[in-house]
Image (tube, grey):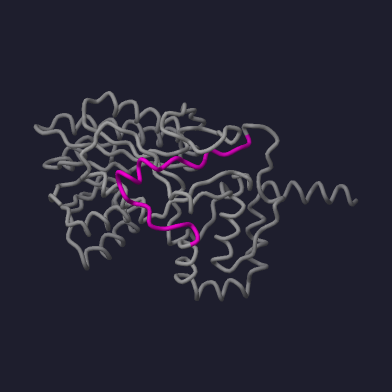
Amino acid sequence: MIKMNILLTGAFGNVGLSTLEMLLKQGQSVKCFDIKNSKNLKSQKKLLKNSQFETIWGDITNLDDIERAVQDVSNIIHLAAIIAPLSEKIPEIAYKVNVEGTSLLIKAAKKLRKPPKFILASSVSVFGKKMNDPPPRKVNHPISPTDNYTRHKVEVEKILQKSGLSWLILRLGAVTPLNLPTKLDPIFFEIPLDQRIEFLYTKDAGMAFANAVSIDINNKILLIGGGKGCQLYQREFIKKLLNAIGISMLPESAFKPVKKKSDWFYTDWMDTQESQELLNYQSYSFDQYINKLKKLTVKKRFGLRLVSPLVKFSLLLMSPYYKFFKSNESELNS
């Protein structure tokens, strides 16, 4: 494998760390670009104990920072973004980062004497809410952005395709980190239990991006998901995830009911045959991920089981649907 100089933006995020790990295993020269904060500094320090890479701390919306980062790179893997649900809470900042920041990065890349290949992280969510259409989603299916995040992804996809750079766009499925967040986001309850979802193991996502650097194919959109063993419904996804950390399934009334088409979420199963043939990245099924998660959380799981009723109660307090159900139930019983 030819050693390449690669700029990796969002290097210390979930997919970023997995991509960095895979690139370093391949012996690539990596320049990491990310925001300097305590979390990212901790991740960088931990990785530097066993690996060598360059880090440029900067702001994706600052042209000076970007122009400094793109010098002497042959490939750019662009992962930095504000994702949902935060993108819906701070729309102006999200647009500045997701669209204007990406545009600046593309502009800086085009100025180089030898412009680099640009690999962009996008999402299956750009297809919109397609639960009424038979799966799987394919690259040639029409897109239908439904919120700030998906509109941003669609916009930057178009900007990149018109840029004149060599490019690849990888539309990812649901990438759940190995280190689950300590604080649950209410979006957890916004996905109906009958929703189709395609899981993608974080290290498999990292492998897809790492391998995308070296394939001799450009100007193509690829769908990146875990494959058949990762295609499931949200009910199974949540039940197994909770069980892995020692908590039984929550009542179905805690999750968003589907009364009309717009109530569905924008995840789906994907046709990943082409991407797997080109990138050879699928290694983990969802059940293998769950088993790995159980091993990593064995001590925490024992403790959580002891306080499981209290944890479940605190989770249910976060659900607007369960509160609504209980209040109506009280009115009916009064």
Instruction: Answer above or below: position of 128 versus 230.
Output: above
Instruction: Answer above or below: position of 278 versus 291.
Output: above
* Residue furthest right in the image: 334
Q: Is residue 213 left or right of residue 290?
A: left
Q: Position of residue 52 (x, y in %)?
A: 17, 60
Q: Is residue 286 magenta?
A: yes
Q: Is residue 224 left or right of residue 101?
A: right
Instruction: Answer above or below: position of 64 versus 255.
Output: above
Query: Which range of residues does the magenta coloring cover?
Result: 263-287
Nearer to the camera, 332 or 35? 332
Residue at 36% x, 53% y: name it.
204
Q: Position of residue 68 (x, y in %)?
A: 16, 41
Residue at 19% x, 51% y: name it.
30
Q: Is residue 174 magenta?
A: no
Q: Position of residue 277 (x, y in %)?
A: 33, 45
Nearer to the camera, 300 or 283? 283
Q: Residue 201 is drawn in which quadrant?
A: bottom left
Residue at 52% x, 58% y: name it.
183
Q: Position of residue 324 (x, y in %)?
A: 74, 46
Q: Residue 285 is drawn in which quadrant?
A: bottom left
Q: Is residue 21 left or right of residue 135?
A: left
Q: Is residue 43 left or right of residue 51?
A: right
Magenta-colored segment: predominant secondary structure: loop
Residue at 35% x, 58% y: name it.
39
